Amino acid sequence: MTIAMAKRISTVRQSPTLAVAAKAMQLQSQGLDVINLGVGEPDFDTPQHIKNAAIMAIDSGFTKYTAVDGISELKAAICDKFARDNKLEYSPNQILVSVGVKHSIYNLCQAVIEDGDEVLILAPYWVSYPDIVLLSNGIPVIIHTNSANQYKVLPEQLEQMITAKTKLIFINSPSNPSGIAYTLEELQALGAVLRRYPQVLIATDDIYEHIVWSRPFCNILNACPDLYSRTVVFNGVSKAYAMTGWRIGYAGGSLELIAAMKTIQSQSTSNPCAIAQKAAVAALNGGYETISAMSDAFHQRHDYVVQRLLEIPAIEVVPADGTFYLFPDVRKIIRNHGYANDIEFAERLLNEVHVALVPGSAFGTEGCIRISFAVNQQTLCTAIDRLIRFCNVHN
């Protein structure tokens, strides 16, 4: 018997980054020494004080349902975090705690996108944006950027792509996969364009806020406070606190938008894990010492990888402003060796020297690769040695 699946299944992909991880694990299970530089999570352990809060929650019996939108203690901590770190004021009923930022973004798209609405996505983009839009019956409209502009969209590009059907734009800064962050002035210029189109909602994905080193972090509301009522700010504890598996993300926005997102969540997952919420309280209220230590380590690894990549003349790399990614351009190597595309480059790299990377086409930008340096220094050195050997042979 063949089961007829919904048409929406044919429009979306499985996560390319998870596919790379699965392939790497398959080769590792065969006894091969595979180094996975495709991972999108810190290699550090969750700080002990956060784990202790979770243990205390379990021991005290805090294992029941909570409010759909999160416990009051966590929502208060999120409000304090927004005020302290971002100079943004939200009341607790303007906060929604979800099962990770991906879930929060899904809630927004389900709440606001009608059939045929267009959503602007800046490439290179986080892999899930287009598919979440498609699952909401929206139309992803990709705005391509390039290394010459540091993978940043220009105001005139943005204006050209806005139509009467445009409903939403995603801004991710610092960016996964490029690591590039917009300056305050650049966000002001984009805001000047968006200001002329009041029907366009803004989703700012700030999940890498605390992993930035080139300049102080800012988002579009810091640049354009007047856009507050139509902007939703997304963040979470996954990246900054090494808590990817705890699955806590959150959104701050207008009462109307957050209420609609809460309704969607109430009929899908209900509340996030009660124990993980208690851990997130400890994370947000626990100071910056562990955050700073991890960010400093990522910065050092970034500088190391950039310096090593300079040994490969055929690779072009734009240094990152933050995150734990680099997004080098390998088109010359692809062209010189006659590869079909960046996917073949990544496949050959994995099969020949056993280093797993994610091809840039997964992020909407062909001819590049995403390198994650969220591995220990010794492993990173070995992986980059292999990458350089591969590129020099195939140059």
Image (cartoon, helix red, strand yellow):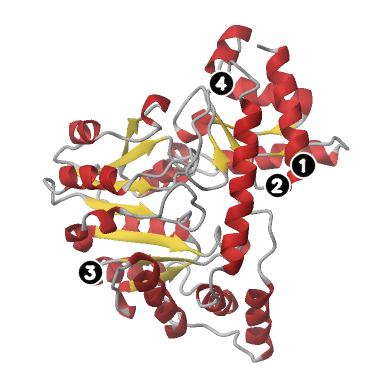
Q: CA distance from mark 4 to mark 2?
A: 22 Å
Mark 3 packing: few (<14 Cα in 10 Å), some, or many (20+)? few
Q: Amino acid at mark 2?
A: Val
Q: Amino acid at mark 1?
A: Thr
Mark on residue 256?
3
Does the CB distance between marks 4 and 3 fall below 8 Å? no
Element on which disc 3 rests: helix
Rendered view: 343 above or below 26: above
| Quadrant of the drawing holding the C terminus | top right
Query: Badge 2 is on which residue?
Result: 375
Query: Badge 1 is on which residue?
Result: 379
Going from the N terminus, do you reach mark 1 or mark 3 first? Answer: 3
Residue 101 or residue 140, whichever sits in front = 101
Query: Which one is in front in this view, the residue at disc 3 or the one at disc 2?
Result: 2
Q: Residue furthest right?
A: 31
Query: Badge 4 is on which residue?
Result: 330
Q: Position of residue 278 (x, y in %)?
A: 56, 80
Judged left or right of residue 200, residue 327 is right
One can see residue 244 in this view: no
Query: Which one is in front in this view, the residue at disc 1 or the one at disc 3?
Result: 1
Mark 2 packing: few (<14 Cα in 10 Å), some, or many (20+)? many
Judged left or right of residue 177, residue 199 is left
Mark 4 packing: few (<14 Cα in 10 Å), some, or many (20+)? many
Q: Residue at x 52, y 83 (%)?
A: 65
Q: Amino acid at mark 3?
A: Glu
Q: Position of residue 84 (x, y in %)?
A: 38, 72
Residue 53 or residue 7, whichever sits in front = 53
Going from the N terminus, do you reach mark 4 or mark 1 first? Answer: 4
Query: Which one is in front in this view, the residue at disc 4 or the one at disc 3?
Result: 4
Does the CB distance between marks 1 and 2 fall below 8 Å? yes
